[in-house]
Image (tube, coloured by chain):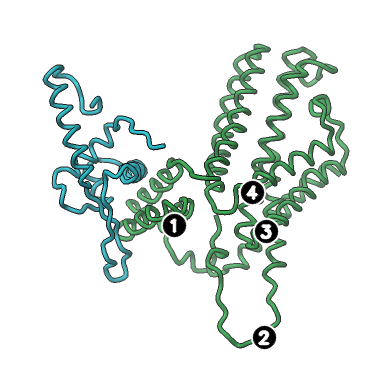
């Protein structure tokens, strides 16, 4: 049953690819109409706060006068860096700080447990890998946080995903360190709740593109939140409970194994939550996009924001 | 709250490039090429300078199918700021020949 659940995310990924193809088949047949630097710079410009929108247009205007694919690509890539370096404003700034606390907390906790139990060089290498991974996740989240209307529902959605996981598996630290895995628990935690949050995101945002961004931010927040909680559990419980045979039956081995389990959980949830949430948001978007009954023969206009994907 | 930290060496290079002909409007890409900065470093600097009122910005009209370009030059405040930096540097150079602009 649990093994079967792993196929569901794969099916969702396949569904996403099919939906992507169906949305714009010419992209696959003829290639994109615009070059990569232009799309990259336009994406970066979209991340800027409304007060900074002029600077995004400045980058796009400059790109329009740069010749040569390599120079254009270097300029565009550098602009993406510039946008991510510029401090966020308003709710985006608050959301960024919340994400910094989560990401830094994840790494610091891992380091603290490693130092306290003197887990050795391997654990420090794992800490370095975790730091790089979490930094990448943070960069991805910071791009989402800069989109309008995403911060609050995204963080709230993450809270729902994390709390639902804990309600199902048990709130106590022992429940997290020594989980009693029941198949239907995983079904709810991994599939049902992220999918529902994704669908609710689209309904909340009233726009499929915004909904997908909210769903991804919620998934990332939920994953990091759960990781921090489970690592706190290891820090508090320590070697409590039966020693893990995978860890060689020693205190340090048991704690190393528990930390590694948490890292695997983080890698799994950071991959699966956004995929399932994206699928839920896209499914709700299909419902929103259902054409109303024709009442007039007037021209049909589309919302360009809905066409733009983060 | 606006913080007025001492400008970085890169910021000083940008200011110096703009100060060579303060009345002339400059393009971002040309400025980046002149001071050997990537756009990822230049634009945050320009944003901060504009936020501090040291920079005037304007738009050049679109040329044909090409989009309009953003133009930059030192504002009056910016010119005063660069003059103060230069004066501070001159004083420090007199006291300590090894001091740099970035310490101004």
Q: Are marks 4 and 3 in contact (CB under 8 Å)?
A: no
SS at badge 4: helix
Element type at marker 1?
Answer: helix
Considering the image in quadrants, where does the C terminus of chain A appear?
bottom right
Front disc: 2 or 4: 2
Q: Chain of mark 3?
A: A
Q: Nearer the viewer, mark 1 or mark 3?
A: 3
In the image, what residue occupies the spot 15% across and 51% down?
B23
Q: Residue furthest left?
A: B94
Separation (CA) of disc 4 from disc 3: 11 Å
Of the residues under marks 3 and 2, which one precedes in the sequence?
A: 3
The residue lying at 45 percent from left, 52 percent from top is A44
Q: Earlier in the sequence, mark 2 or mark 1?
A: 1
Any idea which chain is the green one in this picture? A
Please tell me whether residue B18 is drawn above or below residue B60 in the rendered image: above
Residue A210 got which mark? Answer: none
Mark 1, residue position: A42
Residue corresponding to mark 4: A216
Question: What's the CA distance linking mark 2 and mark 4?
Answer: 36 Å
The color chain B is rendered in: cyan
Instruction: Specify the label residue A295 is tagged with.
Output: 2
Give me the C-alpha separation between circle 1 and circle 4. 20 Å
């Amino acid at each position: 049953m649990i093994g079967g659940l792993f196929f569901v995310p794969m099916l969702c990924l396949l569904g996403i690819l099919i939906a992507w193809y169906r949305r714009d088949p010419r992209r696959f047949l003829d290639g994109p109409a615009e070059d990569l630097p232009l799309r990259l710079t336009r994406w970066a410009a979209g991340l800027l706060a409304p007060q900074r929108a002029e600077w995004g247009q400045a980058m796009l205007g400059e790109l329009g006068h740069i010749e040569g694919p390599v120079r254009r690509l270097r300029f565009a890539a550098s602009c993406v860096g510039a946008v991510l370096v510029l401090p966020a404003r308003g709710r985006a700034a608050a959301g960024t700080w919340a994400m910094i606390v989560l990401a830094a907390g994840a790494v610091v906790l891992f380091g603290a447990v490693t130092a306290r139990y003197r887990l050795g060089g391997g654990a420090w290498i794992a800490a370095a890998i975790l730091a790089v991974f979490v930094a990448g996740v943070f960069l991805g989240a910071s791009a989402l946080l800069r989109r309008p209307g995403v911060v609050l529902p995204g963080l709230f959605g993450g809270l729902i995903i994390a709390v639902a996981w804990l309600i199902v598996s048990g709130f106590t630290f022992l429940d997290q360190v020594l989980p009693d895995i029941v198949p239907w628990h995983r079904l709810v935690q991994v599939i049902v709740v992220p999918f529902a949050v994704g669908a609710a995101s689209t309904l909340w945002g009233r726009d499929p593109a915004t909904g997908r961004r909210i769903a991804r931010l919620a998934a990332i927040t939920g994953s990091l939140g759960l990781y921090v909680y489970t690592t706190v559990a290891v820090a508090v419980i320590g070697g409590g409970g039966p020693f893990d045979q995978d860890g060689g039956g020693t205190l340090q081995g048991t704690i190393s194994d528990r930390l590694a389990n948490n890292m695997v959980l983080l890698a799994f949830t950071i991959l699966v939550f956004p995929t399932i949430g994206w699928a839920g948001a896209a499914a709700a978007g299909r419902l929103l996009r259902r054409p109303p009954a024709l009442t007039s023969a007037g021209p049909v206009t589309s919302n360009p924001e809905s066409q733009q994907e983060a | 709250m606006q913080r007025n930290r001492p400008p970085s060496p890169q910021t000083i290079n940008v200011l110096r490039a703009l100060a060579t002909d303060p009345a002339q409007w400059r393009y971002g890409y040309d400025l980046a090429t002149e001071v050997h900065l990537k756009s990822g470093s230049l634009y945050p600097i320009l944003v901060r300078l504009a936020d501090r009122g040291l920079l005037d910005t304007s738009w050049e009209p679109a040329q044909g199918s090409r989009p309009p370009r953003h133009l930059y030059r030192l504002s009056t405040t910016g010119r005063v700021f660069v003059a103060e930096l230069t004066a501070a540097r001159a004083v420090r150079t007199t006291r300590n020949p090894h001091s740099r602009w970035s310490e101004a």
